[in-house]
Image: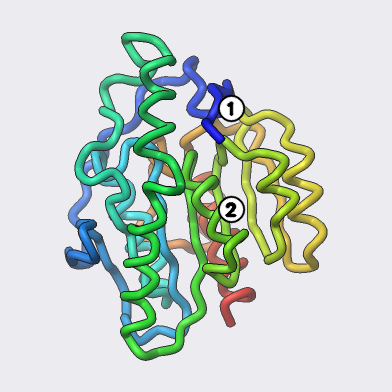
Amino acid sequence: SRLKCQMSCCPTNLPPAARAEYNGKGNGALLGTAETYVSGDPKSKKAIVLVTDIFGFGHSNPYQVADLFAEEGFYVVAPDFFGGRPWPLDDFPPKDGMQGFMEWVNSAGSFDTALPVLSAALAHIAEQGADAKVGILGFCWGARVAFHAAERKLATAIASCHPSLLTEELAAALDMPACILPSKDEAPLEFVKEAVEKNEHGVWERFDDQPHGWCSARGVFPEKLTKAAAESNRAAEALLIVKDFFDKTLA
C-alpha cells in the first residue's frame, strides 16, 4: 500500500538537521549493489543492521551511531538504502511541498526497494560464520523497514527511535521483541505501544521532550554509550536503552 503523508513522519516544524563532522572507525564494503558501512568485529555473536533516516549518508551521524554500537560489541552493517540518492539534507521541509517528497518515499523508501539491500546485508552477516543473532535498528522511515522485516522473521529483534509511517497492520503482525522510542513529534501510536508490550521483552518509552530525529540527523552524540553520558545527553540515553535491549534479546 502506498504511504500517506503523516505529520509524524519528519514533521515540518523542526529545525534543520545537524551537519556534524565525524571520521568513521569502520570500513566500506559493497554488499550486493549497495555501498555499505561496516563497523565492529565480524565474528561477533550479535549483529545490527542499521537503517538510516531519509537523509541516508548525507550526514555523518550514521557512521557515529554505527561505531557507538560497534564499541559495545556489536557487528554493525549500515547499507546505503538510497543508492547514493537520499533526500537532500538542505531540502527539508521540502521547498516544493510534501507531495513530491511522499512520492519519493513511496518509491525510494518502499519495502520492495529496501528488501534486496536488507537481504544482502543479512547474507553478509551470515557469511561471517559466527551464527550471529540479528537486530534491525531503524530511524524515522527505517522503522517501517524494521517492522516489515519482523513480519517476515528476518531478524531476532527490532528497534526504532522516532519511528514514522507505521500502520496498524504492521503493528498487528509484530511477533518478536521490539524497542520503540518515539519523540514528542510522533502521534500517540497507541496501537504500536500495545503490540510492543505484548512481548515480555518489549520496550516502549516516549521521549516527549525531544524532537523527531534526535537520535539521527538532529543528534549530537558522546564518544561512548556510558551511563554518565546518558545523564546529560538524551540521544545517548535512548541509544543506551536500545543497546541494553539488543544485549538481552540477541544473547
Is residue 224 positioned above or below 97 on the image? below
In front: 221, or 168? 168
Q: Position of residue 207 (x, y in %)?
A: 64, 39
Which quadrant, please, contains the C terminus? bottom right
Q: Residue placed at 24% from the left, 39% from the top?
A: 58
Residue pictured at 31% horizontal, 42% vertical: 56
Q: Quadrant of residue 178?
A: bottom right
Which amino acid type is shown beneath numbered disc 2?
Phe
Using residue 162 as the reference point, say whether residue 126 is left or right of it. Answer: left
Q: Which residue is mark 1?
A: 8
User: Nearest the camera: 76 or 117?
Assistant: 117
Q: Residues within 10 Å of mark 2 (few under 14, many from 20)?
A: many
The residue that disc 2 covers is 147
Residue kind at label 1, given as amino acid type:
Ser
Name the quadrant containing residue 177.
bottom right
Residue in the image at 36% along x and 77% along y? 125
Indicate which label's residue lies in the foreground, 1 or 2: 2
Task: Compute the Cα span from label 1 to label 2.
Answer: 17 Å
From this viewpoint, which residue is outermost toward the top? 96
Of mark 1 and mark 2, the one earlier in the sequence is 1
Q: Residue at x 23, y 46 (%)?
A: 83
Which of the labelled discs sits on residue 143, or is there none? none
Check the image and tell me how it is coloured.
rainbow
